[in-house]
Image: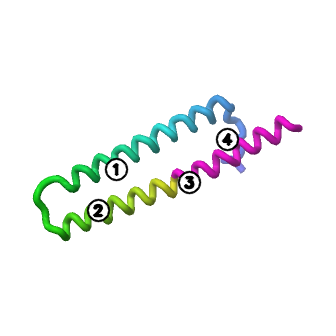
Amino acid sequence: SHIMSEYVRMTDTERDQIDQDAQVFMRTCADAIHQLRTEAHKGVQSAQVKEHRTAVLDFIEDYLKRVCKLYSEQRAIRVKRVMDKKRL
């Protein structure tokens, strides 16, 4: 109840700022993963280490994709609610 009352008090401007910050953060994370992937394959290393690093980066990238999908779904719900309010 308390959490919902705090959520309701957010302005559309605050929500828009959170959306913008979230998008920047997700892009930054994707860029960092790409950079790590590039660096992970540099240098001499065993095949096992290379495979392990690739698997870890694949896991992290998949996790980010799932977070981005969840964020997109939540944002779509917000946009739908705004459109519904405007129609009323």
| CA separation in Å, label 4 and label 3 | 25 Å
| CA separation in Å, label 4 and label 2 | 41 Å
Q: Which residue is mark 4?
A: 6
Indicate which disc residue 15 carries: none
Q: Position of residue 14 (x, y in %)?
A: 62, 32
Q: Which residue is mark 1?
A: 33
Q: Position of residue 57 (x, y in %)?
A: 33, 59
Q: For the residues labelled 1 and 2, say whether their Cβ atoms are less than 8 Å apart.
A: no
Q: Does 17 appear in magenta? A: no
Q: As shown in the figure, which amino acid type bears the numbered disc 4? A: Glu
* Badge 1 or badge 3: first in the primary sequence: 1
Q: For the residues labelled 1 and 3, say whether their Cβ atoms are less than 8 Å apart.
A: no
Q: Secondary structure at mark 1?
A: helix
Which of the image's four quarters has the C terminus?
A: top right
* Badge 2 or badge 3: first in the primary sequence: 2
| CA separation in Å, label 1 and label 2 | 11 Å
Residue visible at 72% across and 40% down in the picture: 8
- Identify the residue at the far bottom of this view: 48
Residue visible at 26% across and 67% down in the picture: 52
* Badge 4 or badge 3: first in the primary sequence: 4
Q: Position of residue 87 (x, y in %)?
A: 86, 37
Indicate which disc residue 69 carries: 3
Residue visible at 44% across and 42% down in the picture: 27
Q: How crowded is the residue under tag 4: few (<14 C-alpha within 10 Å), some, or many (20+)?
A: few
Q: Which residue is mark 2?
A: 54
Q: As shown in the figure, which amino acid type bears the numbered disc 3? A: Lys
Count of all numbered marks drawn on residues in the image = 4
* Badge 4 or badge 1: first in the primary sequence: 4
Q: How crowded is the residue under tag 3: few (<14 C-alpha within 10 Å), some, or many (20+)?
A: few
| CA separation in Å, label 4 and label 1 | 34 Å
Q: As shown in the figure, which amino acid type bears the numbered disc 2? A: Thr
Magenta part of the chain? 68-88
